[in-house]
Image (spheres, rainbow, N blue to C red):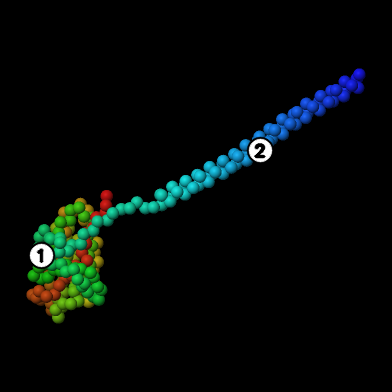
């Protein structure tokens, strides 16, 4: 009897152990399933996040377009005072070729332009290589709102002076030929020689 009871208990124990093992195996299978799928989901999320950051970085990398508005001081832009003669062809100053220029002479010594709404003025200033002989020297100047910002003596074969002047908040810019001089220092009375303002341009940054 004791032997049969022992066998019965052993069988019962084995059955319970077998049940526990089955449950554990089932749990392990479930955990493995979740682990695999969780890893896949995590991988997808990481990939999606990385792609999103890449797209965001690409969007952020593209610079914001800023419009620059430019206006050549040509024949279509009349001065508010003085005389401005503009030529759309090429001009050569000390061997350097420019496209388009305005000129001042001893007879037409200045031109003033409206600077309101503009940020900068740029041009290159020198003496036209195609001039009368002997060539005079010119004392050139640039003023903003009546204040002289630049003055220089320029002559034949001398490298042109390239200027960029800030105009933001100002009202007027004036280009001047202060004087034209012969080689001996006497005033030049002719009208053929030209003080050249090559590729004169106003510009403003879009805001």
| Badge number at residue 166 | none
Residue ID for mark 1: 83
Residue ID for mark 2: 32
Residue 93: % across, % down: 22, 74
Q: Looking at the image, is mark 2 or mark 1 earlier in the sequence?
A: 2
Q: Residue at x 64, y 37 (%)?
A: 33
Residue 135: % across, % down: 15, 78
Instruction: Examine the image and state in which quarter residue 1 appears.
Output: top right
Label 2 sits on a secondary structure element that is helix
Label 1 sits on a secondary structure element that is loop
Q: Residue furthest bottom?
A: 133
Of residue 105 and residue 9, the one placed in the foreground of this image is 9
Instruction: Examine the image and state in which quarter residue 30 appears.
Output: top right
Residue 102: % across, % down: 16, 67
Q: Is residue 183 visible?
A: no
Of residue 58 and residue 135, the one placed in the foreground of this image is 58
Other-residue count near label 1 (Cα within 10 Å), few / some / many at <14 / 14–19 / ≥20: some
Residue 60: % across, % down: 40, 49
Instruction: Examine the image and state in which quarter residue 38 appears.
Output: top right
């Amino acid at each position: 009897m004791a032997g049969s009871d022992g066998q019965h208990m052993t069988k019962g124990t084995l059955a319970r152990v077998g049940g526990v093992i089955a449950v554990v195996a089932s749990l392990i299978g479930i955990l493995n399933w979740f682990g695999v799928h969780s890893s896949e989901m995590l991988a997808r999320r990481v990939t999606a996040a990385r792609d999103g950051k890449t797209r965001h970085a690409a969007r952020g990398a593209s610079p914001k377009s800023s419009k620059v508005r430019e206006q050549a001081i040509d024949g279509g832009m009349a001065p508010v005072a003085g005389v401005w003669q503009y030529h759309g062809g090429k001009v050569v100053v000390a061997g350097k070729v420019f496209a388009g220029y305005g000129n001042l002479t001893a007879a037409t010594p200045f031109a003033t332009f409206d600077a309101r709404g503009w940020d900068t003025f740029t041009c290159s200033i020198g003496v036209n290589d195609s001039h009368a002989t002997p060539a005079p020297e010119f004392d050139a100047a640039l003023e903003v709102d009546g204040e002289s910002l630049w003055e220089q003596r320029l002559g034949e074969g001398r490298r042109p002076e390239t200027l960029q002047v800030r105009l933001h908040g100002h009202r007027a810019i004036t280009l001047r030929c202060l004087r034209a001089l012969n080689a001996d220092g006497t005033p030049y009375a002719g009208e053929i020689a030209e003080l050249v303002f090559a590729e004169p341009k106003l510009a403003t940054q879009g805001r």
